[in-house]
Amino acid sequence: MLNGINLIRALSCLAIAIFHICELINATYTGVQVSFNLAGPGFHLFLMISGFILVYITHPADNPARFMTKRIIRIAPAYWLMTTLAIGLVLMRPWFLPGADLSPESIIKSYAFLPHVDQVGRTMPILFVGWTLGYMMLFYGLFSLSLLAPARFQIWTAIGGLLAVMMLAQLLPDPVWRAFYGDPILLEFAAGCLVGMALRNPHVIDWIKAHQMWPIALVGFIGLIVAMLSNTQGFTQVALYAPASALLVFAAVGQDLYRVRLGGGLLQRLGLVSYGVFLIHPLVIPVFGITIHDYIDDGPIGAALLFLTVLPVTLMLADLCYRFVEKPSNDWLRARLIHRPKGSATAPKTSMGSANEN
């Protein structure tokens, strides 16, 4: 159970939610400006963890089809459900997600994790946080193909494939696809894989056992603050965020695997519901944001009330989503689509179990 990763993953998703609450407050509430620009640390940590998790969960018996099926089963059902809810809500209340494009092309690309431009010029699907899942699906595909290579070259093959995609993207005629698949933020998946590789190295393991992890975590945390305050873009942004995120993930996993594991219950639950928090908060924020603004207060009191309602409601709904959507769909689909080879070893598991990694 990687409870340190559970904590970081939950905090990254909550940071993204807080950033989007701030966006709505700044746009609609009178006399209130809040500038918690937490989206950067949240998204960068989210991608870094995803790269690490792929290394950590890969089963020796996995083949490309089996591996990719597991990843789609984990990511797609809840995302498709929330996208469907978003479409329904926008049809009833067009203000619900400003800029959402409900054209057939947009709907198809949103469900298929493909980049496209919405009505206000953003390269985002209908459920806007899904843009990161487009990157995740790309890397899942590359990682699954890398399983065809000999075991010792698999991770390097996946990283090489990622770099190749970024370079070849510059040749694409569509500027949207060119910018999306050439974005240096993809390098954070590669960095996450390198963290996973380092944590398998016997010399690194010995070093971790002999040293405290909290100073490394502290340096990573400070690095994230510096990156957030720098407000940079492109390769410079990744150059600031990637090392800081990598240090934080390295320290958290090293502590759990090779030193004293962080306490369980609550951290484990936060890990379980973090994906739900990520998907659900864009639907909760406008409901409470507009209701509080129109019927209670459109100033500082209303803004404070928005924080006090959105975050706990999102956590509650995320827990329900995990109980009644994510886990049942994962279990049902795995039982029917994935067959474990006879005599294969049990796959290594994260704290969410082999069916529930993000």
Image (spheres, rainbow, N blue to C red):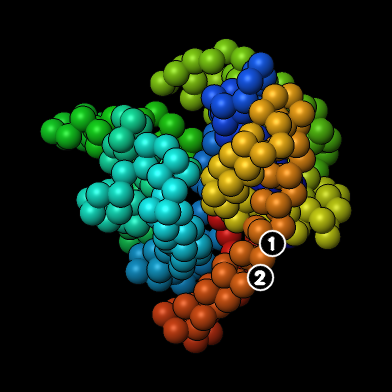
Q: Please tell me whether mark 1 sits on a helix, a strand or a loop.
A: helix
The residue beneath circle 2 is 323
170 lies left or right of 254: left
Q: What type is the residue that disc 2 sits on? A: Arg
Residue at figure coordinates x 44%, y 18% from the top left: 233
Relative image position of residue 55 (x, y in whole percent)? 53, 53
Q: What type is the residue that disc 1 sits on? A: Asp
257 lies left or right of 143: right
Residue at figure coordinates x 13%, y 33% from the top left: 173
Q: Mark 2, residues whose alpha carbon is within 10 Å: few (<14), some, or many (≥20)? A: some
Residue at figure coordinates x 74%, y 49% from the top left: 312
Q: In the image shown, does 72 or 24 lie closer to the viewer?
A: 24
Q: Please tell me whether mark 2 sits on a helix, a strand or a loop.
A: helix
Contact between marks 2 and 1 (CB within 8 A): the answer is: yes
189 lies left or right of 158: right
The residue beneath circle 1 is 319
Q: Mark 1, residues whose alpha carbon is within 10 Å: few (<14), some, or many (≥20)? A: many
10 lies left or right of 341: right
Quadrant for residue 264, please give it: bottom right
